[in-house]
Image (cartoon, rainbow, N blue to C red):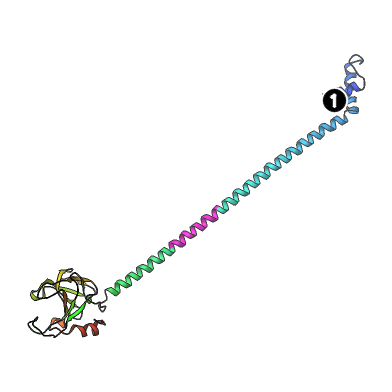
Amino acid sequence: MTAALAAAAGAVGFSHSSLASPTQANSAVNVAALTMGNSQLSEVTTARIERRQLATRDSSRVELSTTEASKKQASAAAISKARAAKLDATKKLTAQRASALAAAKAASEAAAEKERKSSTRCEMMISGYHITAGFGQGGSRWASVHTGTDFAAPIGTPIRSVMKGVVLSAEFAGPYGRQVRIKHEDGTETWYNHMSKFSVSPGETVYAGDQVGAVGVTGNTTGPHLHFEVRPDGGEPINPIPWLEDTCGLNP
């Protein structure tokens, strides 16, 4: 501004030596500024306006950048929240399914256990056998007629309780060898003989399919087998085959 005014003053021919007084000099400068400095003043004003506009644009850009950043942060937060909610829902669904499966498994196991412990459930005493002697059969191997049915099988083959009952005895019984006697709920006794070992003890409750011993050759026998007897109310023996068919629904 000062340079512009000085230039203007020079342009009209003023100098310190030609002025009558300082007051006259100032007046001349003012007149020069008013008459000759309009273009320079316009440039200064324009520059100031441009600076203001530039500052306004910069401010707008900063505000826009801040707004965009805020939008991006909000969007990222929303996406993160949605993912967390989806993950939480998935976890809850997985937990519900696991709980339902566990409940179904527990119910199935409870039903199977109830069925296993049913007093009417029956299971064959032995597997992998063949019958070598029947009930009432005579011969030199017995003092009288045969009192049971012989199921021949390899030594060590598991012998199982035919149905639910209480073990009356598990002991060596002379010609019967190692013998287990079980009393069932209707009073019928089943005898398992010639075993190589015991798997139960007197007083123990067993269920259909529970192992009571294993095939052996103890007592009066010529080979490994299960000698199986059925005695209603603990009395005289009856033919085991019809009993297994009629009472237990088994087909030996």
* Residue designated by label 1: 4
Magenta stretch, main secondary structure class: helix
Image quadrant containing the C terminus? bottom left
Q: Which residues are magenta?
A: 80-95
For disc 1, the neighbor class at 10 Å (few under 14, some 14 to 19, many from 20) is some
Work out whether residue 25 or residue 47 is closer to the camera in this orientation and state it.
Answer: 47
**Residue 167 seen:** yes
Q: Position of residue 199 (x, y in %)?
A: 18, 68
Q: Quadrant of residue 226?
A: bottom left
Label 1 residue SS? helix
User: Is residue 132 in the magenta section?
Assistant: no
- In this rendering, position of residue 61 left or right of residue 73: right
Work out whether residue 124 or residue 247 is closer to the camera in this orientation and state it.
Answer: 124
Please, is residue 95 above or below residue 136 in the view?
above
Q: Residue at x 54, y 52 (%)?
A: 80
Q: Position of residue 100 (x, y in %)?
A: 41, 66
Q: Position of residue 30 (x, y in %)?
A: 88, 24
